[in-house]
Amino acid sequence: MDAWKQAWWLTRNEYRKDKLQWLWSAVFMIYTGSMSGVLLIGQEQSDFINPVVDAFFLIMLPLQGFLFSRRSFRYIQEDSYTQMLAYYRRLPIPNETVMWSRLQQALIGFVYNGLFFYGSLYAVRLHTLDFTWDQYLAFALSCTGYGLLITGLYIYGEFLLSGKKYLLLSFMFLPIGIVTSILIRFSGNYGFWYVIQYSKWWGLLSPVMWIAVVAGLATLWVVSRSTLKKLALRDLS
């Protein structure tokens, strides 16, 4: 509990440093949510199942775990994540506290960004599907579960890699997303359609939602624990 409270102090301190990150994140999520709706409209008006739809969602959904601060934009030029960790180590702030704070920020990011992303997606396209509140919540949680799963890999890069290597890790998600979307294409539909349909059919009992959330949280926890152990051995000088 003490580590959680200390991490919360650290989280609030991080948010005070750059209050514009709330604005930039909201703008970006409104844009990506609206574009997602446009892609879904285009897919439904075409007989060709376009793998770009799934690739777009697979790449964009994990970004909901971030607030777009100056640090997140400067990680290549300034290796800002490494500098942050070195600064906390000098204070000294335990690695456990830093990790808990990062997890808090991720969860806050998914809630905050999700309001704008799923709100704009609903306004542009999904309002025509007559979702009830529990069905739409199931849909949002299904997507968030996947986002949590990938967030663990992003945290691994932030804590253990230099800015340039972290960039390479981020680029890896692009071909993986494209290949995955092409494989889903062979099933005869696009993957996002399955998430929508299962949410409509099952609501909060959706097996897709529960599998995604449990897998996402479990992966995030396991990767975070592994990252924490390796961080203790990392040279931040």
Image (cartoon, helix red, strand yellow):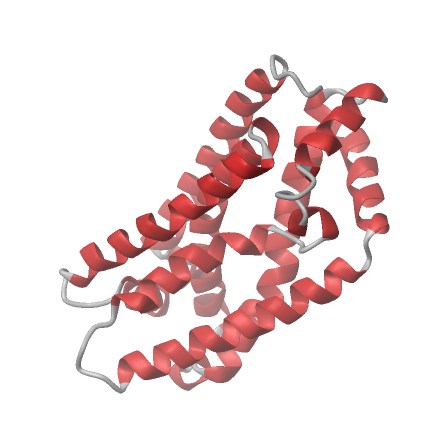
Looking at the image, residue 56 sits to the left or right of residue 87; the answer is: left
Residue displayed at 74% across by 61% down: 22
Q: Position of residue 41 (x, y in %)?
A: 35, 83
**Can residue 1 be seen?**
no
Residue 29 against residue 103 in the figure, above or below: below
Taking depth in this image into account, of 170 and 141 the one nearest to the observer is 170
- Picture quadrant where residue 110 is located: bottom right
Which residue is situated farthest in the front direction here?
A: 77
Taking depth in this image into account, of 183 and 128 the one nearest to the observer is 183
Q: Position of residue 182 (x, y in %)?
A: 21, 58
Q: Position of residue 176 (x, y in %)?
A: 32, 48
Residue 211 against residue 230 in the figure, above or below: below
Q: Quadrant of the N terminus?
A: top right
**Can residue 156 be seen?**
yes
Q: Quadrant of the C terminus?
A: top right
Residue displayed at 57% across by 16% down: 229
Q: Position of residue 61 (x, y in %)?
A: 47, 57
Residue displayed at 18% across by 77% down: 48
